Amino acid sequence: MDPLRKYPAIEDLHRRARKRIPRFAFDYLEGGAGDESGIDRNREALLEIRLIADYLEERTPPDLGVEVFGRKVDLPFGIAPVGLSGLMWPRSAEYLASAAKDANAVFCLSTVASSGVERIGGLMQEGSWFQLYPIREVEKEDDLLKRAWDAGFRVLTPTVDIPAPARRLRDFRNGLTVPPEMTIGNIISILAHPTWALATLAAGPPKFESLMPYFPKGVTYKSVGQMIETLAEGQIDWRRIERYRKIWPGTLAVKGVLSVGDARRAREAGCDGLLVSNHGGRQLDGLVSPIDVLPAIRETVGPDMTLVVDSGLRSGTDIVRAYAKGADFTLLGRAFFYGVGALGRPGAAHAIEVLKAEVFAALQQLGCPNMAAAPRYLAE
Ligand SMILES: Cc1cc2nc3c(=O)[nH]c(=O)nc-3n(C[C@H](O)[C@H](O)[C@H](O)COP(=O)(O)O)c2cc1C
């Protein structure tokens, strides 16, 4: 049966992915910080946005293409950076980067994805995005940035919303450390998910490929978690952003901005854009939803700065809602991993197809000719 009929929405992929991925890995993908009310708030904020259609106006077929950071792409949404990608599904970053390339869409690689900059650089279009978790030692960070540039990444998105480790209770309860603790529960869960287990066996345990050159020789898989903690710089301030502005020749967009103060600082430091995000509700349950702070941030930074929104988007209608509220571009994290978790490699393109069909249908229904016109369809 045509997968678009069998799995017509991200929710269908979500349900199947839940069955195919072991519990501790699915909880890592799905979970949020604290009581997880931040995840619900992200959904509620989007659902609050109502659109209004113009049925009698003359219509043209909708154009889904947008220009973001100087690159023309065919889709108004991209794939957000997701760390430990191989835990949810082996080679998921490769599958997603290739599907994004085929669709002429944006893919953003995480510093701590299982696949490294060189591997993904070989699969994607030049101009892709690289998310940076700052590295404590400047020489190592310089080297990583050079490797990312040489691999063809042109948009750098340093993430600022992890000044301290998040309290993700599902991960605590499941013993999800790096590497995962082999508790009886986790072993049973692996055995109950043979497709995942075999694919993981074939691909080997998830790595942090971009960071491996910076681990001391002979580091064992068991000590990788500790190594990451030693390498990464949690707290970063605007001086660090100024440093990136000096050394990164491409586009710079800070990820994780929610306050107008940070937005102003980032603009003063010379950033080209902001990723207005609360990390999908994964850092603190009490944080405001990005969509709710978007208008104030827009007012602060003016019309020229590119504002990308993520956190909680699950459908094409959500994407149109975010544009109607003033977003210049959108990213989705979990939705694409539900796709790969549900269907493996073809799930990457399938999730893209679902969202594309939904955006198209929403624009057709509204009578909206393109994404830039979406704010006209916002109901007061
Ligand atoms: C499993 C998982 C891992 C993530 N890892 C990273 C990461 O390494 N770096 C980062 O900046 N954001 C990371 N994020 C946040 C995403 O980039 C994005 O902000 C978030 O997923 C958007 O919310 P959504 O999942 O509701 O679409 C991660 C999100 C998830 C779900």
Image (cartoon, grey):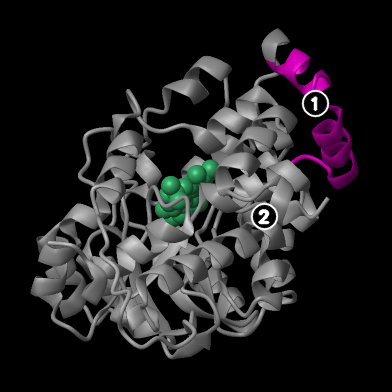
Give the residue furthest to the front.
56
Q: Position of residue 246 (x, y in %)?
A: 33, 84
Up-down relation of residue 59 to residue 238 (above or below): below
Up-down relation of residue 110 to residue 24 (above or below): below
Q: Which residue lies under the disc numbered 2?
A: 212
Q: Tag 2's secondary structure?
A: helix
Q: How many numbered discs, if any?
A: 2
Magenta stretch in the rendered image? 186-207
Residue at image x 69%, y 58%?
350
Query: Could you classify mark 2 by the number of other residues whose Cα lies within 10 Å: few (under 14), some (14-19), or many (20 or more)?
Result: some
Residue nearer the viewer, 215 or 33: 33
Is residue 108 shown in magenta? no
Up-down relation of residue 80 to residue 279 (above or below): below
Q: Amino acid at mark 2?
A: Met
Q: Position of residue 377 (x, y in %)?
A: 25, 71
Q: Position of residue 99 (x, y in %)?
A: 70, 68
Residue nearer the viewer, 301 or 144: 301
Would you say residue 318 is visible in this rendering? yes
Task: Give the left or right position of residue 58, taking residue 335 as reference.
Answer: left
Task: Give the left or right position of residue 300, taking residue 75 as reference.
Answer: left
Q: Which residue lies under the disc numbered 1?
A: 193
Q: Main secondary structure of the magenta part?
A: helix
Q: Position of residue 201 (x, y in %)?
A: 87, 37
Task: Give the left or right position of residue 81, taking residue 313 as reference.
Answer: right
Q: Tag 1's secondary structure?
A: loop
